[in-house]
Image (spheres, grey):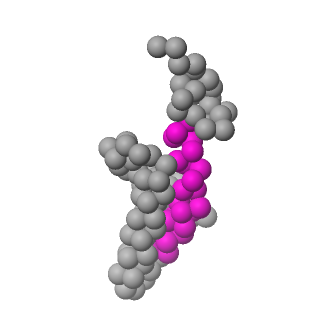
Amino acid sequence: MSSILIFCRDCGKQVPSSETRDGLCLDCRVRRSVADLRSEHARLWRKRERYRSQNANVEQIGRQIARVEDRMGQRIKVMVSNDRQATDLLRRELEAARGQRYTIKGV
Ligand SMILES: [Zn+2]
């Protein structure tokens, strides 16, 4: 294999040059492309927890969260042609987004 390895300028990981765009590895490109949706996701998630603690109806917020997750999936699909890889990346982004609520809770 004659593929050149370069360092991703964001995470510093060594990746084949064929998998990078603008010096960024695929993981970082995906992360950046859904960054705004992830903060939207976190905002809705916090809102839902707040509503739930007040015994309010959270059904609508649940639908909004699902819609944001759909949009994340669509963006990732555009960037990643391989279906299985796109699914893996989406799952990781969603896990990160859902896990975020623990670190920002109480802010
Ligand atoms: Zn990277």
Across and down, in percent, residue 83 comes to 34, 47
Give the camera-side residue of 12 and 58: 12
Across and down, in percent, residue 16 comes to 53, 25
Compared across the picture, whether 22 is left or right of 60 comes to: right
- Placement of the C terminus among the 4 image quadrants: bottom right
Give the camera-side residue of 85 and 12: 85
Residue ID at (42%, 58%): 73
Residue 7, above or below 83: above
Q: How many marks?
A: 0
Residue 44 falls within the magenta-colored stretch: yes
Farthest residue to the front: give it: 2
Farthest residue to the top: give it: 1
Residue ID at (61%, 38%): 21
Give the camera-side residue of 98 and 90: 90
Residue 63, above or below 15: below
Q: Quadrant of residue 54?
A: bottom left
Residue 27 falls within the magenta-colored stretch: yes
Camera sees residue 58: no
Give the camera-side residue of 6 and 55: 6
Residue ID at (35%, 81%): 59
The part of the chain drawn in magenta is: 25-49
